[in-house]
Structure formats: structure tokens, C-alpha cells
Amino acid sequence: MRSKIFYWSAWILVLFCLLLAVVLFSFCAGPVEMPLKKILKVIFEGRGSSEYSILFDIRLPRIILGFAIGGALSLAGVILQGMFRNSLVEPYTLGISGGAAVGVCLNIVLGLSRGLGIISLPVCGFLGAILVILLVYFLSIRKGILKIQGLLLTGVMISFISSSLIILIMSVSHTEDLHGIVFWIMGSLEEPNWLLIKLALGIAVFGLAVSYLFCFDLNAFSLGEEEALHLGINVERTKRLLFIVASLLTGFSVSVAGIIGFVGLVVPHFVRMLVGRDHRILLISAFLCGAIFLIFCDSLARIVIAPLELPVGVITGILGGSLFIYALSKKQVSLGDK
Amino acid sequence: MAMRRNIILLVVLFSICAVAFCFLLKLPDNSARKAAHCRYPLALAIGSQTMVLQPKRIISLGPSVTKAIYLLGAQDKLIADTVYCIDPPEVKKKEKIGTVTEVNIEKIFNLKPDLVLATSLTNSKAREKLKNLGVRVITFSTLKDFNDICNQFLELGRLVDKENEAKEIVKSVESEIILIKEKVKGLYKPKVFVQMGARPLFAATGSYFVNDYIEFAGGINIAKEARQGIYSREQILKENPDVIIITTMGAMGMVAEEEKNIWQKYETLSAAKSGRIYIIDTDEITAPTPQSFVKTLADFEHILHSGEQNEK
């Protein structure tokens, strides 16, 4: 028991160090050359200079948002995969991202963002996400019992419907609106509004804290719903709460940063390979790993073809997917639960 | 035992987060440091003298803006532009800060511009971010007609302190346009379809400046009333245009050639019967300045009325 705690603390320490390294890398990476030495100098002496502004007004917000979104998405992935006992579930499977996308597209096409300012985009995205969450939830609840399989199927269908709706909206919209929609769908950590960034961070951390309260329940869930019930867990309440936490995390992340794929699918698997299936450690390490992964990918996206910038989803997909296949072929672990 | 450890872990976690969060909230909130909105040329009165401040470091985020700056002779003030800005040829030497749609904020900021000229295609988040950083950003909207082109050109002239040059250019262009309008007056008005894209079939509608090429040159745009650009082939066959003009749509004109072949297969189409299907270079049509507008307009006039002049 004691050794387990040491092992876990060691893991968390390692992840924190990695996070620090990645954050430093992200501070250095960019079209404007900033070696480490210069950064220290700028931080302590350069107040008011343009380098200071680049570090704290351009790079820092992206790092913080990357931390929040990466953490939130992979946390949602862990929760959903644990709850559904299905390794192909990810935050976007349940159609929440689709709902957010439809909300944002409608906003762009109806020209709301021109009248109400750019802040209305994430608001509309979040409204769309909430609508889908409620729809999926009430469609799959029967006599007070949340049907897991029904939830999954409804979610998948809703994401198909919403992707068709997006194509419908795109086909009738003007050229300059099309650009807006495509930008949003590609996903980006560039966010001019500090309040949204802080809110994203707050919600991600809050999600981690709440889901951590259920780490034992999630462990019991991995045996099966019935077994969890026999272990004395209030299965229905837990399922509902976890579903709501995971979907809020996803909905908010998507409405702020757009659809950044793969973080919520690959990171949980990867972390499970590294630290095992115990949710007590899994939740925290998945959060940290997701944050590390996304910040790293975002820094890469900035420097690969500078001065142009790649959409971060390109890097997460290519890097995450190939890393995962490599790890899978090395370890020969089975993807299924148990 | 397990429960207690759980709680301890949670408390530790919470305190870490709380500290981190407090640290974060203390950071300077830069959205408050918005640029003071001032109009250029900025007149400063010092004593009895009046000094006029002009922007000296301009970044252009659109090919048409870059072209117009060169036309006005203000290229010394232009410090950077996009990778799509290739006309005139000497513009290639300027620093590049991204594409028309996706720009590199960090690079723009580091060049310390005092004026950024964006277009409606520029990523709106990027525009917002630059404004928050205290950079002055002016966005030129999509061009709806010839008046828009002139107004934006005059506005640009005012911004770069070349107002008189801009006025002169617009004046001479306007008189040229009047000449062309006189020339086509009373001639038969052919029905015209201008195709801007192939898959999906995309038309130049009445709310796009290309419509003015057709109308000024004495033609009828069959897609004028269409609300969206996506157009059906059946509708075109029904309207039966006398002339079809296809823009090259990138890809070395291959797509345009293919489209031309497709149109020629319709035997009932009068444009196909008389062989009046033309291909025009996209760069000529889009990204217009008043000067390039009148040049393209002359091409249109030639295309629409060359047949009749031969008959006369």
C-alpha cells in the first residue's frame, strides 16, 4: 500500500516536471526568437517592452488555455470511458461538440457575432452544447434509469445529425461566413478574451475536483454496473453526475477552443498504459498529460511552418495517433477493459 | 483509511489549484489596456504649431490593400504583408506575416506596426487580439460594388497620407468608366453568367462587385437576384446566357478548361452555339483597385460586344 503511494507521488512529480518543461518550451517557441536566457531577462527587467508583451499577452494565454482545454478534454475522456466501459468513447462521441458547432455556425450565419461582439460565439456554442446534453440525457432516461447504451447511440446519432446540419448551414452561407465557420471547426487556442480563459481554467479544475470525489465509484464501475451496485454504490446518481460533469467539461472546452480532436481519445489510453487502471491516479495523471500534450502540440503548430500557423488539431491528430499506434505495437496490450 | 487518504489528496489538490488561480487572477488584465481610439492623421497642437502624425509602419493583410498601397506610391510605409500578395512583383521582398485568413499575431506585434489594414477574411479572433494588444486595426469589408472599391481606396489614401493621389486616380477611373458606358449605350444587352467556382457551381451575384463589371459593360447578369452564390446548372440552361465567363479558380486554369468543355456540350445553350465562353484570370477580377477595375471592365466590354462590332 505504502509503495503504491510512493509510486503514484513519483508519477505526479514526473508529470509536473514535464508540464514545467513543456511550458518553458512553449514560452521559447514562436516566430520571434526567445532563448531561455532572454526570457528570464525579459521577465525580470523587461516590463513594458514588446518582448514582455509577447510573452505575457500572446504566449501565456495560449499556455493557460492549452492547460485547461487539454486537461478538461482528457479528463472527460477518462470519465466517459470508465463509465461506459468502452474504449472508443471520447468526449466528442456524445454529440456535444456537434451541438456546439451548430450553435456557432448559426451565430456566424445569422450575423449575431457582428452585432453582439465576438464573445457571443462561445456563448452560442455553449448553448448548443447544453441543448444536446439535455436532449441526449432525457432521451435515454427511462423510469429514472439512465440507459448507458441508449445514451451512446443517441449521442452518436445526434453527432451525425449535427454534422449534416453544419454542412447545410455552410452550403447556404456567404463566402466570408464560410471562413469563420471553417476557422472555428479547425479549433485554435487563440482566444482574445481573458475572462473566458480564466473561466475555462476554473471549470477544468472544478471538473477534476468533482470527478475525483467519484474515483472509487469509477473503479467499481469497471467491474460492471451490477457489480458496482452490489458494492454499495448509488449507481444511478453517480452515472448522472459523471455524465453531467463530463459533458459540461466538453461543452465548455469546445465552445471556447473549437473542435480539437484526439486529446480526449488518445491521452486517456496512453495514461492507462502508463499508470494503470486505478482511477485514483488515473484522473489526475490524465488531466496533467492532456494539458502537457495540448500545450506541446500548440507550440509545435506555431513553429513548424512559421510564420504560418498550423491548426493545432493537425498536430494532435498526427502526433497523438502515431505515438499511440507505436505504443500499442510495443506493449501488445489489449484495448478492451479488464 | 482509503477514504481519509482520498480527502487529504483532495485538499492538497484544491489548495494547489487555489494558489494557482489566485496567481492567475493577479496577472495584469490586458484587455483593459485597449488602444485609445484616435483617427489618423492625428493632429497634435503644440503651442501655436500643429504637427500631423502619420502612420509610418503599415502591415497589409490583403492582396487588394497591398496593390492599392503600391498604386498610391506609399510602399515605403508598408513593412509587411501576406504570402498571397504577389502583385506588383517587387512586393515579394516585403516581410510575410501569414495568409489572408490566418495571420501570425506574434510576428505582427513584434514588427511594431502603427497601423494594420485587415480584410473581412482575416480571422476575427486575430483582429480582436491585436486590438487588445494596442495595435490599431482597420478592417476593410467585402467589396459589394464599384462605389465600395472607390470609397475604400479613398479611405486608404487618407490613411497613408496620399489623399490627393487617391482622388486623382478615382477621378480618372470614373471618367474612363463613363466613356465605356457611353460606348455600350444602345447596344444589345447580352445575358451573361460569370462563374466563380466549379464544385459547387458558384455564381457572381448582385451583391458582389463582379456584378458591376457586367452591368457597366452593358450586359445582364442572370444571377443578379440570387441570394446565395451556389447556383444550379439547370437554372443556367433555362436562363440561356449569351456569354459565359469562367474565372480560373486557381489550379493553373485546369478546372476552368474542364468547365468550358462541359458548357460546350450543351447544344441548346446560346453561349455554346456561338462559342462565347471565355476564361479570365482570377487575379485580375478579385483583389481590385479602381485601376485594375477599369482594366478588367475594358476586357468585359470587349468580350460582351466584340461580336456586334464586327457585324457593324
Image (spheres, grey):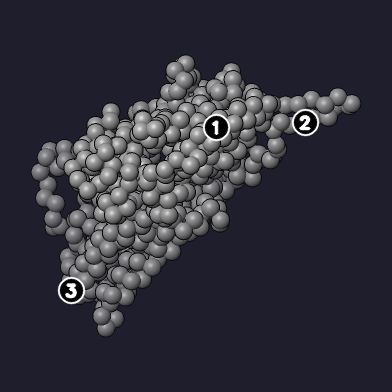
Give the foreground label among 3 and 2: 2
Q: Is residue A64 above or below residue B8?
A: above
The residue carrying mark 3 is A226
Image-quadrant location for residue B250: top left
Q: Is residue A131 left or right of residue B238?
A: right
Amino acid under disc 2: Ala
Q: CA distance from mark 3 to mark 1?
A: 86 Å
Subunit of mark 2? B
- Residue B296: image x %, image y %? 44, 31
Q: Earlier in the sequence, mark 2 or mark 1?
A: 2
Residue shown at the point (65%, 29%) measured from the top left: B167
Residue B31 as seen in the image, left or right of residue A301: right
Front-lying residue, B24 or A257: A257
Q: CA distance from mark 3 to mark 2?
A: 78 Å
Q: In the image, what residue type sits under mark 1?
A: Leu
Residue on which disc 1 sits? B179
User: Residue A229 versus residue B293: which sits nearer the camera?
Assistant: B293
Query: Closer to the camera, B104 or A211?
Result: B104
